[in-house]
Image (tube, helix red, strand yellow):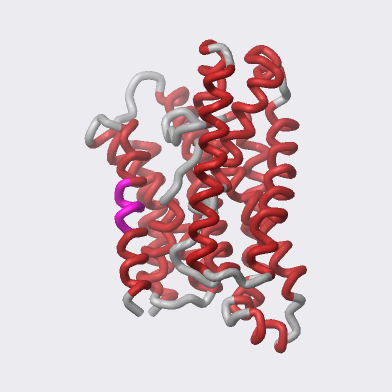
Amino acid sequence: MANRRLVALSIVALVCSIGFMTIGLKGNISFVLGLRATKLVALLQVGVSIALSTVVFQTVTNNRILTPSIMGLDALYAFGQILLVFLLGGLGYAALDPQWKFAGEVLLLMALAAGILLPMLIRRVDIGLMLLAGVILGVIFRSLQSLVARLIDPNEFAVAQGAMFANFNDVRTDLLGFAAALTLAGGAIAWRVRHVLDIVALGKDNATSLGVDWIRTLTLLLLLVSALVAVSTALVGPVAFLGLLVVALAERIVDTRRHALLLPAAALVGIIVLVGGQTLFQHGLGASSTLGVVIEFVGGIVFLVLLFLGSRR
């Protein structure tokens, strides 16, 4: 049954992609198709990277309401952008090679995420305290971001503003090649360790008794999550609740937490939500710029529902 649902999700994702490429074609068709293909590739990468990073992070933390965004990782990435503008100036920031800058940011985010989150996971901090810590980290990074924004020139602030808000219409096409390689590598690693993730979900004691090197495994998985978060944030900006929404839907569709099914299901749902939603808003409702707002609104409601249901158990 779950395999049939995966096939159905694949068909829906394919239909959404075809609709995104073909609906409303007019003018110079080859030029329009080229633009849409570039944007489609970016949306596919964002959907897959957000879905996989959320599944892995929820498994590592053993909680269904925690996501990398809720723990402040995307806020950390956005703060890094405006800090670079402050230190280098608008012209210096614009002169940086996008691929090398992105590579450095990915490595820095991976190091900071491991340094901040790994100690809490090793000590098995209470999930409520982890959620509180994530909120505090997010507030700290956003406050620092606001502080730096007040210190820089308004013209330079406009350079970094694109990294602060999710925008599915203006994707970073100059990073598509590097981001695609990182997304494919991350997806391959997540699929390769799918059975290890099943064991990690059993908890530290059970996983250790089954031969899993707990600290090493957590470190590698957190580095994987950080790299995938960097991909999605770099391409479209921070999206707080998209991962939570996608994984919650995927889990209910396949009705299992087995990662061999949940990982592809979450990736496909992420593609459907982004590509299908963008197609609907862009060609159906004529309000494509509101997709991020709708996703955040619905995702926030899902978060509150999951939080409420979890508190009643």
Q: Quadrant of the N terminus?
A: bottom left
Looking at the rendering, which quadrant does residue 251 occupy? bottom left
Q: Is 72 included in the stretch rendered in magenta?
A: no
Give the vertical position of 36 relative to 280 (above or below): above
Q: Is 301 included in the stretch rendered in magenta?
A: yes
Give the vertical position of 246 relative to 136 (above or below): below
**Nearer to us in this view, 95 or 215:** 215
Specify start and end residues of the magenta stretch as a single range. Answer: 297-302
Name which residue lies at 58% across and 18% down: 151
Q: How far across and how far down the image is residue 299, in percent? A: 35, 53
Query: Most extreme residue toward the left, as rendered?
Result: 285
265 sits left or right of 229 in the view = left
Name which residue lies at 71% across and 88% down: 209
192 sits left or right of 277 in the view = right
**Nearer to us in this view, 56 or 3:** 56
**Can residue 48 be seen in the rendering of this structure?**
no
Q: How far across and how far down the image is residue 131, in percent? A: 49, 60
Looking at the rendering, which quadrant does residue 260 occupy? bottom right
122 sits left or right of 281 in the view = right
Give the vertical position of 154 relative to 112 (above or below): above
Name which residue lies at 75% across and 70% down: 215
Give the vertical position of 172 relative to 150 (above or below): below
Q: How far across and how far down the image is residue 115, in percent? A: 72, 54
88 sits left or right of 311 in the view = right
Magenta: main secondary structure equals: helix
**Can residue 115 be seen in the rendering of this structure?**
yes
